[in-house]
Image (spheres, helix red, strand yellow):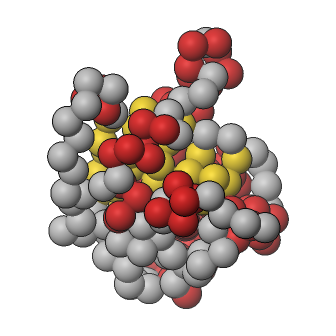
Amino acid sequence: QATTPHESEWDAGEIVPGLWVGGLSAAENEDELIRRCISSVVTVGTRLQPQVSWTSVKSQSIANKRYDIEDHPHADLLQIIPSAIRAIDKVMKGRSKKESDARTGVLVHCASGMSRSVAVCIAWLMLRCKMSLDDAHEMVKAGRPVARPNFGFMQSLRLLEERKDVRLAQDKWTRSNK
């Protein structure tokens, strides 16, 4: 499958309509954010701040929410999941309610778009689309082939799958890491 020039410049993949996952360079690419109707950018990473020079009137309304988490197996992914899911929901729920928002999207990114942002998108699919961890992971990999959440994030996602609730999974994760 051939890629267009735009696709080769865009370091992100669409997981489901409107939900994009990618690297820092995708968040810094104002033209592509506008072209793909991205209305919100979710940054997942410590000391990770997109160097954005969003100067166009269209891009001034792009919301940017940031969550500090290291890409480390002992980082507490479950702590940021509830808030990150709500940030994604703001855009995704709006897509189904208003015709004018039907084309808006959200970009979830970390430094490389391989671990932290991927884990957040997997959690969203599990909780909002009622998918298994394996199915959600496969769906994300289909849109973002470099998707590889670290071992600790995968453990957290397994707990989330078992408990079906972030608080219950977080309690178990906290007890097992003391």
Q: Compared with residue 55, is residue 43 higher up or lower down, i.e. above or below?
A: below
Left or right of 99: which side holds 30?
left
Write the residue at 46% across / 54% down: 108
Q: Nearer the viewer, residue 148 or 112?
A: 112
Q: Quick one: quadrant of the C terminus?
A: bottom left
Indicate the position of residue 121 as horizontal and vertical percent values.
58, 57
- Percent position of residue 165, x then y: 62, 52
If the image is split into quadrants, where does the N terminus sit?
bottom right
Residue 148 at x, y = what percent? 58, 81
Q: Quadrant of residue 162?
A: bottom right
Note whether residue 86 is visible: no
Measuring 39% from the left and 49% from the top, which residue is drawn there?
42
Residue 81, position as x, y percentages in the image: 47, 54
Residue at position x 33%, y 45% from top?
30
State left or right for residue 178 relative to residue 57. Answer: right
Is any atom of residue 69 visible in this view? yes
Q: Nearer the viewer, residue 157 or 4?
A: 4
Report the residue at 61% width, 39% height from top.
18
Q: How many marks?
A: 0
